[in-house]
Amino acid sequence: MTDAPATSPQKPRALVIWRLFGMVYDALPVIALWLLISAVFTVAYTFLGHHGTRENIAPYSPLQLLLWLVCWGVTGLYATLSWRRGGQTLGMRPWRTRVVTPAGGQPELRALWLRYAVATVSLLAGGLGFWWAWIDRQRLTWHDRASGTRLIREPKRAR
C-alpha cells in the first residue's frame, strides 16, 4: 500500500485564502502567549532590574530584542509542535488544512522548523512567499518548497 500524493483528488492542495484564514485564527492563541511572555518580562524587569520603579523596557534595547526573540521562539514551538502532533494548529482545524510530506506522511521536526523560519522571512517580505503560491504551478509557497512539506485541505467528513 502506498501513500497517495498530497495532490490527489482526495487531498486537494490548500489555496492561499485557507492559509490566511488559519493564520488569522492562530493569531488568537499566539497573541495570548505573547501577552503572557510580555507580562513575565515586564514584572521581572520592574522588580528585579529596577527595584520597583515604573519604567518600561526601553525600545530597541537588548532586553526588548530578547523579548521579541522569545516571542518568536515560543510561536515556533506552538506551530512546530502542533504540526508534529497532528499536522494542524488550532487555527488550521476549522479550515481542514494539514501540513504533510509530499507523500502525505508526517514531516520531521527539522523540516517543520525550517518551514516556520522560511514562513517568517516570507511574512517579513510582505507575505511575498505566501502570494507566490498563486503563480506556482503546484500552488506551493516558499516555506512549502524549502521544507519539503505541503499544506493540504481535507474534504468534509460525512455526518
Image (cartoon, rainbow, N blue to C red):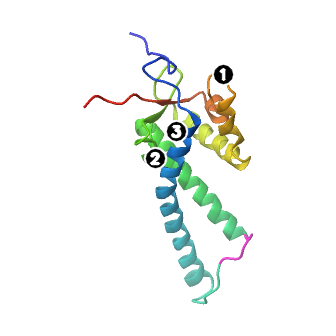
* Residue 56, image x, y percentages: 64, 80
Q: Which residue is mark 3?
A: 18
**Residue at 72% across / 73% down in the picture?**
59
Q: Which residue is mark 2?
A: 91
Instruction: Give the Cα separation between the discs numbered 1 and 2.
Output: 26 Å
Q: What kind of residue is marked 1?
A: Arg
Q: Nearer the viewer, mark 1 or mark 2?
A: 1
Q: Secondary structure at mark 1?
A: loop
* Residue 92, image x, y percentages: 45, 42
Q: What kind of residue is marked 3?
A: Trp
Q: What kind of residue is marked 2?
A: Gly
Determine the residue located farthest toward the left in the rendered image. Answer: 159
Determine the residue located farthest toward the top in the rendered image. Answer: 1
**Residue at 56% across / 39% down in the picture?**
17
Give the mark nearest the N terminus, 3 or 2: 3
Give the mark nearest the N terminus, 3 or 1: 3
* Residue 30, image x, y percentages: 51, 57
Give the mark nearest the N terminus, 1 or 2: 2
The stretch of residues the image draws in magenta is: 57-61
| Tag 3–tag 1 contact (CB < 8 Å) | no
Instruction: Give the Cα separation between the discs numbered 3 and 1.
Output: 18 Å
Q: Which residue is mark 1?
A: 137
Q: Nearer the viewer, mark 3 or mark 2?
A: 3
- Where residue 1 is drawn, which disc sits there? none
How packed is label 2: few (under 14 Cα within 10 Å), some, or many (20 or more)?
A: many
**Residue at 56% across / 29% down in the picture?**
149
Identify whether 99 is placed above or below 57: above
Q: Secondary structure at mark 2?
A: helix
| Tag 3–tag 2 contact (CB < 8 Å) | no
